[in-house]
Image (cartoon, grey):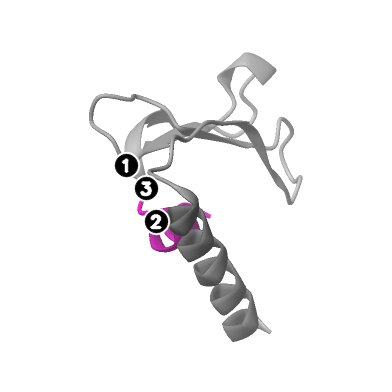
Amino acid sequence: MIDFYGRILGLSVSDGRKREAGASRGDSEIVFLSNDPEVHQQLQLSASLFDGDDCNFVHQVSFRLGGLGELREIARRIVEETQHAA
């Protein structure tokens, strides 16, 4: 998922922590991504709370765009990415 958000939104990891197997709920894996060095976390990805779960969660997203054209370009990349994945 980190690679996907890097390709689509130009995000890179700004912070986070790994989860050890059997760790408590409060120790779940969490990754923060940003494309702005002044903003620590524009996107937060968290792994499942339980061992063996096969899903990830997006808990928080916040972006400021320069205009409608930038939003349209991001939408175009998402459509292109999903067409290649199919």
Which stretch is magenta? 1-11
The residue lying toward the viewer, choosing from 57 and 43, is: 43
Tell me where residue 42 appears, x and y as whole percent.
Answer: 45, 32
Residue with the mark numbered 2: 6
Assess whether mark 3 and mark 2 are in contact (beta carbons under 8 angstroms).
yes
Tell me where residue 72 appears, x and y as whole percent.
Answer: 52, 61
Assess whether mark 1 and mark 2 are in contact (beta carbons under 8 angstroms).
no
Q: Is residue 23 magenta?
A: no
Q: Amino acid at mark 2?
A: Gly
Outermost residue to the top = 26
Assess whether mark 1 and mark 3 are in contact (beta carbons under 8 angstroms).
yes
Q: Is residue 4 magenta?
A: yes
The residue lying toward the viewer, choosing from 60 and 13, is: 60
Image quadrant assignment for residue 22: top right
Numbered tag placed on residue 11 in the rendering: 3
Is tag 2's residue or tag 3's residue first in the polypeptide sequence? 2
